[in-house]
Image: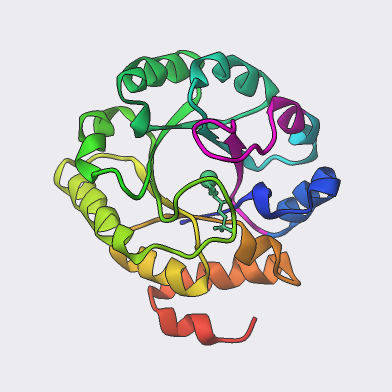
């Protein structure tokens, strides 16, 4: 299981400090949300922030590109220190060449799918990716409510991976708290991106630890336990 705090929910006045906090938290990866103000109605941060914080941690950098033209961004993000690059299936005709390009840069490839998009859209790419990210909110902002209607997509993606014996990780992103993490684990998710719940917790380390317990138990009742 992977727990990946999302830097989007951290204190943007202190990225370095926040990355060090994530580093000490026992998290597995750091999730970095890149928004271009076009694919989504918000702007976050770019490769220079990633380059600046890269020396502060050995955490895997899971870079989620919510961008209309990722092809111009792949090399800058790889040079800045990305370990995995996630692009969106909604880019349609661009998806196959982008996957090829990320592989040619020797980085892991993730494919994300938005809530309104049918899960069948990812099927042609499942044997080419390292991670499938099922968005459980409409991307663009942290702190939104989990959309429960996305859970069947997680179940379907898990069923396909078992049937076809494929190795991709199954990630969920958006509105992941202790309760919804357990629900996603039950549906088959193994990788949990969480911004607000983790970074806004008093004690990030305790929050990461609790999310791990909740996910291991596959039981939302464990979510009621005190931190
Ligand atoms: C949403 C981003 C998420 C976001 C999750 O557009 O892709 O990674 O940071 O934040 P929370 O956990 O606050 O929903
Ligand atoms: Zn994300």
Name the residue: 50% across, 20% down. 69
**Image quadrant in which you'd find residue 155:** bottom left
Which residue is at the front of the view, 46 or 127?
46
Whether residue 173 appears in this view of the structure is yes
Left or right: 56 as drawn, with respect to 59: right
* 20 up-or-down from 145: above or below: above
Q: Which residues are magenta?
A: 26-51
Which residue is at the front of the view, 27 or 136?
136
**Image quadrant in which you'd find residue 113:** top left
Residue 37 location (% of width, % of height): 59, 33
Residue 194 location (% of width, % of height): 56, 58
Residue 97 location (% of width, % of height): 36, 14
* 58 up-or-down from 154: above or below: above
Tell me if residue 41 is in the magenta stretch: yes
Whether residue 61 appears in this view of the structure is no
Tell me if residue 32 is in the magenta stretch: yes
* 218 up-or-down from 13: above or below: below
- Quarter holding the C terminus? bottom right
Left or right: 175 as drawn, with respect to 100: right
Name the residue: 31% across, 25% down. 92
Which residue is at the front of the view, 152 or 23?
152
Q: How is the image coloured?
A: rainbow
* 211 up-or-down from 171: above or below: below
Name the residue: 30% across, 27% down. 128
The number of numbered badges drawn on the structure is 0
Left or right: 123 as drawn, with respect to 206: left
**Image quadrant in which you'd find residue 187:** bottom left
Residue 200 location (% of width, % of height): 70, 65
Name the residue: 26% across, 53% down. 153
């Amino acid at each position: 299981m992977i727990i990946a705090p999302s830097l989007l929910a951290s204190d943007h006045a202190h990225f370095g400090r926040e990355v060090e906090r994530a580093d000490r938290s026992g998290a597995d990866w750091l999730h970095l949300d890149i928004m271009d103000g076009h694919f989504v109605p918000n702007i976050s941060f770019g490769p220079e922030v990633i380059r600046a914080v890269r020396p502060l941690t050995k955490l895997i950098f899971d870079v989620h590109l919510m961008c209309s033209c990722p092809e111009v961004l792949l090399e800058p993000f790889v040079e800045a220190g990305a370990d995995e690059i996630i692009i969106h299936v909604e880019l349609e005709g661009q998806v196959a060449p982008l996957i090829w390009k990320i592989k040619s840069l020797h980085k892991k490839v993730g494919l994300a799918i938005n809530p309104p998009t049918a899960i069948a859209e990812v099927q042609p790419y499942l044997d080419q990716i390292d991670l499938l990210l099922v968005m459980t909110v409409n991307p663009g902002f942290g702190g939104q409510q989990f959309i429960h209607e996305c859970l069947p997509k997680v179940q379907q993606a898990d069923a396909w991976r078992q049937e076809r014996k494929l190795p991709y990780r199954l990630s969920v992103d958006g509105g992941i708290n202790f309760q919804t993490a357990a629900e996603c684990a039950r549906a088959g998710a193994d990788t949990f991106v969480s911004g607000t719940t983790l970074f806004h917790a008093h004690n990030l380390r305790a929050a990461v630890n609790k999310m791990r317990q909740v996910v291991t138990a596959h039981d939302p009742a464990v979510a009621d336990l005190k931190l």
